[in-house]
Amino acid sequence: MRKHTLFFLSSISLFASCTSNFSEKEETDPFSKEALSDSINLLTDIRPKHEDGDINAIIEIPSGTIEKWELEKTNGQVEREFVNGLPRTINYIGYPGNYGMIPQTLLSKENGGDGDPLDILVLGAPVKRNSILKCKIIGVLYLLDRGEQDDKLIAVSEGSPLYDINSIKELNENFKGVSDIIQLWFSNYKGPGKMKSKGFGEKDVAISILESSIKEYNLNL
Protein backbone atom coordinates (compact mmCIF):
# COMPACT_ATOMS: atom_id res chain seq x y z
CA MET A 1 0.00 0.00 0.00
CA ARG A 2 2.83 2.42 0.92
CA LYS A 3 4.62 1.71 -2.36
CA HIS A 4 1.42 2.33 -4.33
CA THR A 5 0.77 5.59 -2.45
CA LEU A 6 4.30 6.86 -3.05
CA PHE A 7 3.96 6.09 -6.77
CA PHE A 8 0.68 8.00 -6.90
CA LEU A 9 2.12 11.05 -5.12
CA SER A 10 5.30 11.10 -7.22
CA SER A 11 3.19 10.88 -10.39
CA ILE A 12 1.13 13.85 -9.23
CA SER A 13 4.35 15.84 -8.77
CA LEU A 14 5.41 14.94 -12.33
CA PHE A 15 2.03 15.99 -13.70
CA ALA A 16 2.04 19.24 -11.71
CA SER A 17 5.38 20.19 -13.25
CA CYS A 18 3.65 20.31 -16.64
CA THR A 19 1.21 23.01 -15.51
CA SER A 20 1.64 26.73 -14.89
CA ASN A 21 0.84 28.61 -11.69
CA PHE A 22 -2.93 28.84 -11.18
CA SER A 23 -2.91 32.32 -9.67
CA GLU A 24 -0.94 33.66 -12.64
CA LYS A 25 -3.44 32.12 -15.05
CA GLU A 26 -6.33 33.70 -13.13
CA GLU A 27 -4.90 37.16 -13.72
CA THR A 28 -4.59 36.79 -17.49
CA ASP A 29 -7.32 34.40 -18.58
CA PRO A 30 -9.75 36.26 -20.94
CA PHE A 31 -12.67 33.88 -20.46
CA SER A 32 -13.45 34.56 -16.81
CA LYS A 33 -17.05 34.87 -15.62
CA GLU A 34 -16.63 38.65 -15.70
CA ALA A 35 -15.40 38.57 -19.32
CA LEU A 36 -18.35 36.54 -20.60
CA SER A 37 -21.70 38.19 -21.02
CA ASP A 38 -24.63 36.49 -19.31
CA SER A 39 -26.36 36.68 -22.70
CA ILE A 40 -23.95 34.04 -24.03
CA ASN A 41 -25.40 30.57 -23.75
CA LEU A 42 -22.41 28.29 -23.24
CA LEU A 43 -24.35 25.27 -24.47
CA THR A 44 -25.92 26.68 -27.65
CA ASP A 45 -23.80 29.70 -28.68
CA ILE A 46 -20.35 28.09 -28.73
CA ARG A 47 -19.43 25.78 -31.59
CA PRO A 48 -18.17 22.33 -30.61
CA LYS A 49 -15.38 22.01 -33.21
CA HIS A 50 -12.72 24.07 -34.96
CA GLU A 51 -11.78 23.70 -38.60
CA ASP A 52 -8.47 22.07 -37.61
CA GLY A 53 -10.32 19.31 -35.77
CA ASP A 54 -9.75 20.68 -32.28
CA ILE A 55 -12.76 21.18 -30.03
CA ASN A 56 -14.05 23.73 -27.54
CA ALA A 57 -14.41 22.67 -23.93
CA ILE A 58 -16.40 24.76 -21.46
CA ILE A 59 -14.59 24.45 -18.13
CA GLU A 60 -16.91 23.92 -15.17
CA ILE A 61 -14.33 22.78 -12.61
CA PRO A 62 -10.73 24.05 -12.82
CA SER A 63 -7.86 21.63 -12.28
CA GLY A 64 -6.93 21.16 -8.64
CA THR A 65 -10.25 22.37 -7.21
CA ILE A 66 -12.97 20.42 -5.38
CA GLU A 67 -16.13 22.57 -5.70
CA LYS A 68 -18.75 21.04 -7.98
CA TRP A 69 -20.09 23.38 -10.64
CA GLU A 70 -22.02 22.34 -13.73
CA LEU A 71 -23.68 23.79 -16.80
CA GLU A 72 -27.37 24.48 -16.33
CA LYS A 73 -28.98 23.37 -19.60
CA THR A 74 -31.99 25.68 -19.25
CA ASN A 75 -29.94 28.90 -19.36
CA GLY A 76 -26.51 27.81 -20.61
CA GLN A 77 -24.68 29.15 -17.54
CA VAL A 78 -22.24 27.38 -15.24
CA GLU A 79 -23.77 27.28 -11.76
CA ARG A 80 -22.88 25.89 -8.33
CA GLU A 81 -24.22 22.39 -7.78
CA PHE A 82 -26.36 21.83 -4.68
CA VAL A 83 -27.44 18.63 -2.94
CA ASN A 84 -30.17 18.82 -0.28
CA GLY A 85 -29.80 22.59 -0.22
CA LEU A 86 -26.03 22.50 0.40
CA PRO A 87 -23.25 23.32 -2.08
CA ARG A 88 -21.59 20.13 -3.27
CA THR A 89 -17.88 19.66 -2.64
CA ILE A 90 -16.06 16.43 -3.37
CA ASN A 91 -14.42 14.67 -0.43
CA TYR A 92 -11.15 13.92 -2.21
CA ILE A 93 -8.10 15.65 -3.70
CA GLY A 94 -8.73 18.16 -6.51
CA TYR A 95 -9.52 17.32 -10.11
CA PRO A 96 -6.47 16.07 -12.08
CA GLY A 97 -7.32 18.27 -15.07
CA ASN A 98 -9.71 21.00 -16.18
CA TYR A 99 -13.13 19.36 -16.20
CA GLY A 100 -16.12 20.44 -18.24
CA MET A 101 -18.37 19.78 -21.19
CA ILE A 102 -18.44 20.11 -24.97
CA PRO A 103 -21.07 22.57 -26.25
CA GLN A 104 -23.73 21.54 -28.74
CA THR A 105 -23.44 17.87 -27.82
CA LEU A 106 -25.92 15.42 -26.36
CA LEU A 107 -25.64 11.72 -25.66
CA SER A 108 -28.78 10.01 -24.43
CA LYS A 109 -28.85 6.98 -22.14
CA GLU A 110 -30.12 4.95 -25.08
CA ASN A 111 -26.86 5.72 -26.90
CA GLY A 112 -24.54 5.11 -23.96
CA GLY A 113 -24.60 8.56 -22.35
CA ASP A 114 -26.37 10.19 -19.43
CA GLY A 115 -28.66 12.59 -21.31
CA ASP A 116 -26.28 15.53 -20.90
CA PRO A 117 -23.54 17.17 -22.99
CA LEU A 118 -20.33 15.17 -23.26
CA ASP A 119 -18.01 15.31 -20.24
CA ILE A 120 -14.37 16.08 -20.91
CA LEU A 121 -11.14 16.25 -18.91
CA VAL A 122 -8.56 18.60 -20.43
CA LEU A 123 -4.91 18.09 -19.50
CA GLY A 124 -2.74 21.20 -19.31
CA ALA A 125 -2.35 24.37 -17.27
CA PRO A 126 -5.24 25.18 -14.88
CA VAL A 127 -7.68 27.81 -16.17
CA LYS A 128 -10.60 29.73 -14.71
CA ARG A 129 -14.11 28.41 -14.49
CA ASN A 130 -16.14 29.41 -17.59
CA SER A 131 -13.05 29.32 -19.79
CA ILE A 132 -13.61 28.24 -23.38
CA LEU A 133 -10.61 26.00 -23.87
CA LYS A 134 -9.38 24.95 -27.32
CA CYS A 135 -8.10 21.39 -27.06
CA LYS A 136 -7.42 18.14 -28.91
CA ILE A 137 -9.15 14.87 -28.05
CA ILE A 138 -6.77 11.94 -27.48
CA GLY A 139 -9.04 9.24 -26.03
CA VAL A 140 -11.83 8.28 -23.65
CA LEU A 141 -11.98 6.80 -20.15
CA TYR A 142 -14.73 4.20 -19.81
CA LEU A 143 -16.45 4.54 -16.43
CA LEU A 144 -19.41 3.03 -14.64
CA ASP A 145 -21.11 5.24 -12.03
CA ARG A 146 -23.14 2.93 -9.79
CA GLY A 147 -23.55 0.63 -12.77
CA GLU A 148 -24.48 3.35 -15.29
CA GLN A 149 -22.16 4.37 -18.12
CA ASP A 150 -20.43 7.70 -17.42
CA ASP A 151 -17.52 7.96 -19.87
CA LYS A 152 -15.14 10.93 -19.95
CA LEU A 153 -13.39 12.19 -23.06
CA ILE A 154 -9.70 12.98 -22.52
CA ALA A 155 -8.07 15.94 -24.27
CA VAL A 156 -4.89 18.03 -24.24
CA SER A 157 -4.97 21.82 -24.12
CA GLU A 158 -3.57 23.92 -26.96
CA GLY A 159 -0.32 25.55 -25.90
CA SER A 160 0.41 23.03 -23.16
CA PRO A 161 3.47 20.71 -23.07
CA LEU A 162 1.08 17.82 -23.76
CA TYR A 163 -0.42 19.25 -26.96
CA ASP A 164 1.87 17.20 -29.25
CA ILE A 165 0.31 14.02 -27.84
CA ASN A 166 -2.21 12.39 -30.20
CA SER A 167 -3.33 9.26 -28.36
CA ILE A 168 -3.50 7.54 -24.98
CA LYS A 169 -0.65 5.32 -26.18
CA GLU A 170 1.55 8.38 -26.79
CA LEU A 171 0.50 9.85 -23.44
CA ASN A 172 1.68 6.69 -21.68
CA GLU A 173 4.96 6.67 -23.59
CA ASN A 174 5.84 10.34 -23.08
CA PHE A 175 4.16 11.32 -19.79
CA LYS A 176 4.34 8.21 -17.65
CA GLY A 177 1.92 8.05 -14.75
CA VAL A 178 -0.60 10.61 -16.04
CA SER A 179 -3.17 8.09 -17.26
CA ASP A 180 -2.72 6.16 -13.99
CA ILE A 181 -3.50 9.33 -12.04
CA ILE A 182 -6.64 9.96 -14.12
CA GLN A 183 -7.91 6.42 -13.77
CA LEU A 184 -7.19 6.23 -10.04
CA TRP A 185 -8.81 9.59 -9.41
CA PHE A 186 -12.08 8.88 -11.22
CA SER A 187 -12.26 5.41 -9.68
CA ASN A 188 -12.11 6.79 -6.14
CA TYR A 189 -13.30 10.40 -5.91
CA LYS A 190 -16.88 9.47 -5.04
CA GLY A 191 -15.82 6.96 -2.40
CA PRO A 192 -15.21 3.20 -2.28
CA GLY A 193 -17.21 1.09 -4.71
CA LYS A 194 -19.10 3.99 -6.37
CA MET A 195 -17.11 4.25 -9.61
CA LYS A 196 -15.54 1.54 -11.71
CA SER A 197 -13.03 2.07 -14.51
CA LYS A 198 -13.11 -0.13 -17.58
CA GLY A 199 -9.93 1.32 -19.06
CA PHE A 200 -9.22 3.70 -21.92
CA GLY A 201 -10.34 3.86 -25.52
CA GLU A 202 -8.16 5.46 -28.17
CA LYS A 203 -8.74 8.62 -30.19
CA ASP A 204 -10.80 7.09 -33.00
CA VAL A 205 -13.36 5.79 -30.50
CA ALA A 206 -13.51 9.16 -28.74
CA ILE A 207 -14.02 11.01 -32.04
CA SER A 208 -16.85 8.63 -32.94
CA ILE A 209 -18.55 9.38 -29.60
CA LEU A 210 -18.15 13.11 -30.26
CA GLU A 211 -19.63 12.94 -33.76
CA SER A 212 -22.59 10.88 -32.53
CA SER A 213 -23.28 13.38 -29.77
CA ILE A 214 -23.16 16.37 -32.15
CA LYS A 215 -25.57 14.61 -34.48
CA GLU A 216 -27.93 13.76 -31.60
CA TYR A 217 -27.84 17.37 -30.37
CA ASN A 218 -28.79 18.67 -33.82
CA LEU A 219 -31.61 16.15 -34.13
CA ASN A 220 -33.06 17.40 -30.84
CA LEU A 221 -33.03 21.11 -31.70
Image (cartoon, helix red, strand yellow):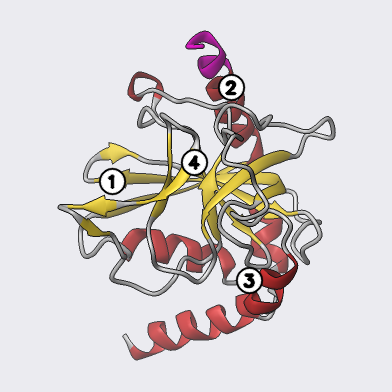
Q: Is residue 77 above or below residue 131?
A: above
Q: Which residue is mark 3?
A: 176
- Mark 4 or mark 2, earlier in chain: 4
Residue count near mark 4 (Cα–Cα under 10 Å), binned few <14, some 14–19, many ≥20:
some
Regarding mark 4 in the picture, which secondary structure is present there? Answer: strand
Residue at the image point whose x is 28% and y is 53% from the top: 195
Where, by quadrant of the figure, is residue 6 drawn? bottom left
Q: Which mark is residue 172?
A: none
Indicate the position of residue 39 as horizontal and vertical percent values.
59, 34
- Mark 2 or mark 3, earlier in chain: 3
Pointers 1 and 2 in contact (C-beta within 8 Å): no
Q: Is residue 28 above or below residue 99?
A: below
Q: Nearer the viewer, mark 1 or mark 3?
A: 1
Q: Does residue 146 appear in the picture of this structure?
A: yes
Indicate the position of residue 157 as horizontal and vertical percent values.
71, 55
Q: Amino acid at mark 1?
A: Asp
Regarding mark 1 in the picture, which secondary structure is present there? Answer: strand
Regarding mark 3 in the picture, which secondary structure is present there? Answer: loop
Looking at this view, name the residue that lies furthest to the right: 52
- Mark 1 or mark 4, earlier in chain: 4
Q: Which residue is mark 1?
A: 145
Q: Which residue is mark 4?
A: 77
Residue at the image point whose x is 59% and y is 54% from the top: 33
- Mark 1 or mark 2, earlier in chain: 1
Residue 218 in the magenta stretch? The answer is yes
Q: Nearer the viewer, mark 1 or mark 4?
A: 4
Q: Amino acid at mark 2?
A: Ile
Q: Amino acid at mark 3?
A: Lys
Q: CA distance from mark 4 to mark 2?
A: 19 Å
Q: Which residue is mark 2?
A: 214
